[in-house]
Image (cartoon, rainbow, N blue to C red):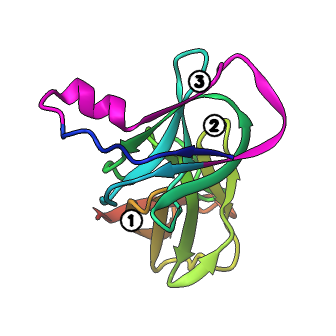
């Protein structure tokens, strides 16, 4: 077990020194341990959006945890390298795919640039709807079924949460109209779109 101990030195005046105090080095990031080992990372305070991050060997960053127990971030890992406290206050983004054929499928792109997507939920006309997720494309989609009401206003609500609790909700209302006399040839008309 690796434990980051408290420091008794005075508070530094420079931001660089403060960042250094919030880091823990666990040997070499190019090496992976044979078995999981436990790391306890001491925190002085807990702020909104705060989490523990790891700097990878290629310079990228990965979310580790935001779970706190007895004043420590506690987690098990095989990965070595530099661990430090970071902050994510940016909510996920939700973008409607405007090119999709709505008579067959509803699509949204969901992304979170900091910690990543934790979960999402879709509702159609206040009923839970099974939106499938394609992580490589950052896309969720729903194949239209009996939840969609023809010739009436349909309300679609998408909510996305990231790994530290930031959330975004988009509510869209459409009318589902028959465009031509041909069977099944339907179009959607956007009534209103609201994001919070």
The C terminus sits in image quarter: bottom left
Mark seen at residue 54:
none
In terms of image quadrants, where is residue 77? Answer: top right
Percent position of residue 110, x then y:
51, 48
Q: Secondary structure at mark 2?
A: loop
Which residue occupies the foreground of this view, 133 or 60?
60
Single out the residue that lies furthest toward the front: 8
User: Which callout, 2 or 1, points at the residue further toward the start of the chain?
Assistant: 2
Single out the residue that lies furthest toward the right: 34
Q: Which residues are magenta?
A: 12-39
Q: Secondary structure at mark 1?
A: strand
Q: How many marks?
A: 3
Q: Residue shown at 46%/80% (left/top)? A: 152
Percent position of residue 149, x then y:
56, 80
Which residue occupies the foreground of this view, 99 or 27?
27
Percent position of residue 161, x then y:
48, 61
**How crowded is the residue under tag 3: few (<14 C-alpha within 10 Å), some, or many (20+)?**
some
Q: Distance of mark 2 from mark 3, alpha carbons?
A: 23 Å
Q: Is residue 65 above or below residue 33?
A: below
Percent position of residue 135, x then y:
67, 43
Which residue occupies the foreground of this view, 99 or 11?
11
Q: Which residue is mark 1?
A: 169
Q: Which residue is mark 2?
A: 137
Res 187 visible: yes
Q: Is residue 65 above or below residue 2?
A: below
Q: Residue shown at 59%/15% (left/top)? A: 58
Q: Residue shown at 25%/27% (left/top)? A: 17
Q: Residue shown at 80%/44% (left/top)? A: 36
Tell whether 41 sits left or right of 172.
right
33 in the magenta segment = yes
Res 180 visible: no
Q: Which residue is mark 3?
A: 56
């Amino acid at each position: 077990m690796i434990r980051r101990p408290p420091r008794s030195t005075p508070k530094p005046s420079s931001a660089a020194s403060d960042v250094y105090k919030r880091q823990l080095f666990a040997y070499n990031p190019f090496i992976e341990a044979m078995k999981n080992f436990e790391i306890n990372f001491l925190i002085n305070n807990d702020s909104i959006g705060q989490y523990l991050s790891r700097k990878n060997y290629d310079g990228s960053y990965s979310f580790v945890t935001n779970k706190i127990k007895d004043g420590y971030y506690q987690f098990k890992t095989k990965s070595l390298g530099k661990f430090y406290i970071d902050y994510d206050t940016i909510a996920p983004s939700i973008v409607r795919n405007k090119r999709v054929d709505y008579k067959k499928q509803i699509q949204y792109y969901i992304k979170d640039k900091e910690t990543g997507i934790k979960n999402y939920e879709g509702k159609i006309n206040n009923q839970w709807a099974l939106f499938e997720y394609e992580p490589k494309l950052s896309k969720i989609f729903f194949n239209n079924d009996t939840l969609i009401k023809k010739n009436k206003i349909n309300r679609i609500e998408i909510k996305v949460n990231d790994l530290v609790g930031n959330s975004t909700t988009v509510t869209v209302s459409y009318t589902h109209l028959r465009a031509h006399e041909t069977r099944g040839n339907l179009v959607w008309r956007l009534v209103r779109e609201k994001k919070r």
